[in-house]
């Protein structure tokens, strides 16, 4: 399948304000802060995360996504909580006013894929509705925004790669490269959860 990946950018925006551009949409997000790496859910008007110590205002990098697009946000170290945000989508609509259209990646081949997340389902703690817990010696026990995970089961992160002509010298010879990747969904690995 050949497609076009569009992007929009905005500067000087907090993560919460960037997420507010997606009112009414449920987005899963991977968030990094000074003392945590955690999954979160944006339910259309607020972020949720059952992990102890998680605060949206303490996030310094985040990727929130659904099947329609991905929001990437990075805190400006000198920006009093504000940062820059980019939204990637195959759609044609900007997230909100004030987002500037960027150069699109045209005529890209699309390659789907998935990453198996670290840890396996465990029942060591009660999880909020819509969440499950995964555990591994290397990461401890982490909340993951998927429901129905069984003990010993796995979760994967689905993504899409956009492949096109390499933008460097190699592209002049016709070589291709992965130009971009965007997250799509978290889902149960059906084989390990049956």
Image: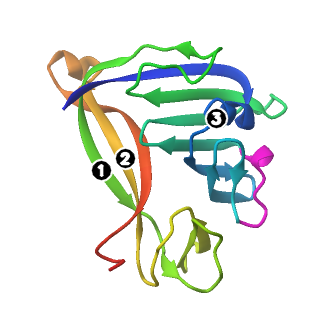
Residue at horizontal 55 percent and vertical 35 percent from the top: 71
Left or right of 58? Residue 108 is: left
Density class for disc 2 (Cα within 10 Å; few <14, some 14-19, many ≥20) is: some
Which of the pair 5/172 is nearer the observer?
A: 5
Q: Earlier in the sequence, mark 2 or mark 3?
A: 3
From the top left corner, tell me how far across and down residue 82 is, in percent. 77, 30
Q: Earlier in the sequence, mark 1 or mark 2?
A: 1
Assess disc 3: are there few (<14), some (14-19) or many (≥20) residues with their C-alpha within 10 Å of its C-alpha: some
Tag 2 secondary structure? strand
Q: Secondary structure at mark 1?
A: strand
Q: Can you identify the residue that label 1 sits on?
A: 113
Q: How many marks?
A: 3
87 and 27: which is toward the camera: 27
Magenta region, residue range? 51-59
Residue at the front extreme? 24
Q: Is residue 104 left or right of residue 131?
A: left
Residue receiving disc 2: 159
Q: Residues within 10 Å of mark 1 (few under 14, many from 20)?
A: some
Q: Is residue 174 above or below residue 109?
A: above
Q: Which residue is mark 3?
A: 23
Answer whether labels 1 and 2 touch (C-beta < 8 Å): yes
């Amino acid at each position: 399948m050949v497609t076009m990946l569009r992007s929009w950018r905005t500067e000087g925006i907090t993560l919460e304000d960037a997420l507010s551009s997606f009112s009414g949409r449920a987005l899963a997000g991977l968030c990094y802060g000074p003392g945590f790496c955690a999954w979160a859910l944006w339910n259309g008007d607020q972020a949720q995360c059952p992990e102890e110590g998680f605060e949206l205002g303490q996030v310094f990098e985040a990727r929130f996504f659904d099947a329609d697009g991905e929001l990437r946000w990075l805190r400006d170290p000198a920006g009093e909580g504000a940062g820059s945000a980019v939204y990637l989508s195959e759609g044609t609509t900007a997230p909100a006013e004030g987002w500037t259209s960027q150069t699109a990646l045209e005529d890209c081949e699309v390659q789907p894929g998935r990453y198996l997340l670290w840890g396996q389902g465990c029942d060591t703690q009660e999880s909020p509705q819509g969440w499950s817990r995964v555990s591994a010696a290397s990461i401890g026990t982490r909340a993951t925004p998927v429901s129905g995970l069984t003990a010993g089961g796995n979760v994967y992160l689905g993504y899409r790669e956009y492949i096109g002509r390499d933008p460097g010298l190699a592209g002049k010879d016709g070589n291709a490269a992965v130009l971009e990747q965007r997250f799509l969904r978290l889902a149960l690995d059906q084989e390990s959860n049956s």
